Image (tube, rainbow, N blue to C red):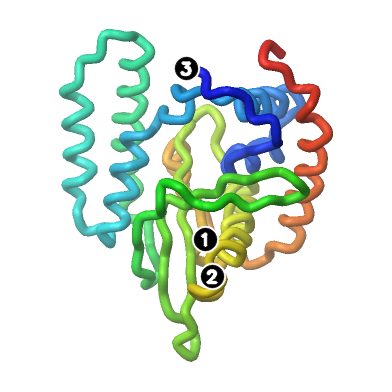
Amino acid sequence: MAKGTNDAPRLSVNKLAEFIEAKARRQRQILRDQKYPTDFKGMYYREASEAIASYIASNMEKTSIIDRAIAVLEQSRPEKIGTRRRIEANIDALESFQTMLDAIDLGGASPMLGANSQPMITIQNVNISVRPDIILRLEGKGRTPLVGAIKLHFPRTFSLGEAGEGIVSAIMQEWVKTVMPDDGEASGAHCFAIDVGAGRLGKGVKATVARLKDVQANCRNIMALWPSILEDD
């Protein structure tokens, strides 16, 4: 179901990272999907995302959350083929995540669920929806409050890769600085992506200057391309 048109350039942080690494044809497809969004694509991994975020927010203690989510999905019997495929993709994502549990380390941080509605940040007039799935809080040297954020990524076809994970980490640090300035300093080591589809645990990056300059340059390109992106492109 179509959700209308985004007249102003707007991308999710994961799609922006993918855009930066993609070839021209895929870049235009990304922009088309972002300019003319649909409910179906936006909620594709909803069940897996909610279950994984809830599990991490439990300080990774309640593995029953993942087991229960898989069981509920397996019991569903949707009539539409597209819905069945979506349910199967969510089960696959949850089972893939289960193989990653031992690799995830919150580095002593306390996790909490990110809000469903969170402010965006704007870079070169492009609105970027960061919406961390998990917010992390901890203390640094001298008991300085630190803030981190985790972003989940699911599609197997378009994984973030090491470069994309670095971009996501850098942008999330900017988000923390912009949206949560009174909560503490952004911790680069605690701003990272979990690429469930690729089975990769991204690393938080400390070096963000060059990455953010690359992001700014790509956002300028997006601004230039946006008017030319048509729904039937």
- Nearer-the-camera pick, 88 or 112: 112
Q: Residues within 10 Å of mark 1 (few under 14, many from 20)?
A: many
Q: Nearer the viewer, residue 168 or 175?
A: 175
Q: Could you give the CA–CA distance between mark 2 and mark 3, rounded to whole angstroms?
A: 38 Å
The residue identified by callout 2 is 187
Q: How many marks?
A: 3
Indicate the quadrant where residue 232 lies.
top right
Judge from the rendering whether residue 145 lies leftward or rightward of residue 20; answer left or right. Answer: left
Res 149 seen here? yes
Question: Residue drawn 65% across and 38% down?
Answer: 10
Circle 1: element type: strand
Pointers 2 and 1 in contact (CB under 8 A)? yes
Relative placement, left or right, of 180 versus 87 is right
Name the residue beneath numbered marker 1: 191
196 w.r.t. 210: above or below: above
Marks 2 and 3 close (CB-CB < 8 Å): no
Q: Identify the mark nearer the N-term, 2 or 3.
A: 3
What is the C-alpha distance between the residues marked 1 and 3? 33 Å
**Residue 161 visible from this viewpoint:** no
Mark 2 or mark 3, whichever is nearer to me: 3
Residue 130: give x, y in percent of width and height.
55, 49
CB under 8 Å between discs 1 and 3: no
Element at badge 3? loop
At 43% from the left and 80% from the top, the residue drawn is 139
Helix, strand or loop at disc 2? strand
Q: CA distance from mark 2 to mark 1?
A: 6 Å
Tell which residue pokes out farthest to the bottom in this image.
142
Which residue is rendered at x = 81% and y = 47% of the image? 217
Task: Identify which amino acid the numbered label 3 is placed on.
Answer: Met
